[in-house]
Amino acid sequence: MMRINGKNLAVEIHGDGEAMIMIHGLGGSSNAWMPQCSVLSRTHKIIRPDLEGSGRSPAKGKISIASFMKDVFSIMDKLEIKSAHFLGHSLGTVICAHMAAKSPSRVKSLALLGPVAEPPQPARQAIRDRAALARKEGMVPIADVLVQVSTSAETKASKPAVAALVREIVMRQDAEGYARTCEALAAAKAADFSKIKCPTLLITGDEDGVAPPAAAKAMAKAIKKSELLLLSGCGHWTPIEKPTEVNDALLNFYYG
């Protein structure tokens, strides 16, 4: 555990070299990045925090995109990291984009998986409704629904272990922490993509209903130095549904 801004955050660090910070999504934890950490930690220093309210990091107060950014910048300061490569998944892509727009000197590159600019207006109330459901009934019903709607048909049919991992990660979240994170995402606004100057890779799945290909393509057009990769047979849990394809893309992005 690391003491950051008056709260305890779980932060895992592996490897040595240039820093890479991996930021998980809503309902996720640092463990969602294990397939990428296992490869990239051979050449980089990988920092994987559990955001406040997620995984092993308890929710202490009101959570927002701004508070997430402040915590990640503070982790960098504590570890004496001036700049880093950033990888984000889902909600993590919102955080990463805002950090790159606000402090471009601290962000060397962006890899955005299941990229989200901001929730579309109809989704905002649905996310708030999910927060209410978490407080009322806990995480099991949410986990069961998300396995069905946020993973691809291929994952459900031929990768039951991945579906099981998604259910386990979501089901084990603290309900109140998850609810506050939902509310933070529901209130999120898009970053100013014109201020993002670093090389950026966007990866999404052809069955990703949260970050559909058309939305990811629009985001890629708004970010100057960007490229987009579309993965077949992949839903929204990009890092674990298509780990080999994601790892190959990341290796080409960083070393190609």
Image (cartoon, helix red, strand yellow):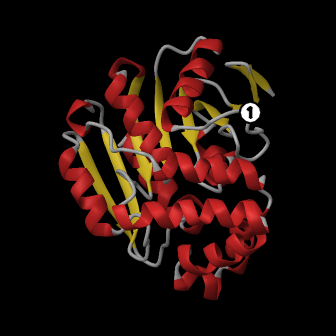
Picture coordinates of residue 158, whole percent (x, y): 63, 85
> At numbered mark 1, what does the secondary structure look like: helix, strand or loop?
loop
Tell me the kind of residue under disc 1: Lys
Q: Quadrant of residue 241?
A: bottom right
Query: Residue at horizontal 65%, vertical 37%?
Result: 48
Q: Residue at x 62, y 88 (%)?
A: 157
Which quadrant would the C terminus be assigned to in this image?
top left
Which quarter shows the N terminus?
top right
In the rendered image, residue 140, in percent from the top left (x then y), is placed at 77, 71
Q: x and y percent of residue 29 in the render?
A: 68, 49
Q: Is residue 139 visible?
A: no
How many labels, in total? 1
Q: Is residue 170 left or right of residue 70?
A: right
For label 1, the crowd category at 10 Å Cα-Cα, with few meaning under 14, some 14 to 19 and many 20 or more, is few
Q: Residue at x 73, y 75 (%)?
A: 141
**Residue that carries the numbered disc 1 in the rendered image:** 60
The answer to whether residue 165 is above or below residue 225 is below
As drawn, the residue found furthest toward the bottom would be: 157
Q: Nearer the viewer, residue 90 or 165?
A: 90
Which of the two residues, 41 or 151, is positioned nearer the viewer here?
Answer: 151
Q: Is residue 128 above or below residue 201?
A: below
Q: Residue at x 76, y 34 (%)?
A: 10
| Image vertical order of residue 191 relative to residue 73, above or below | below
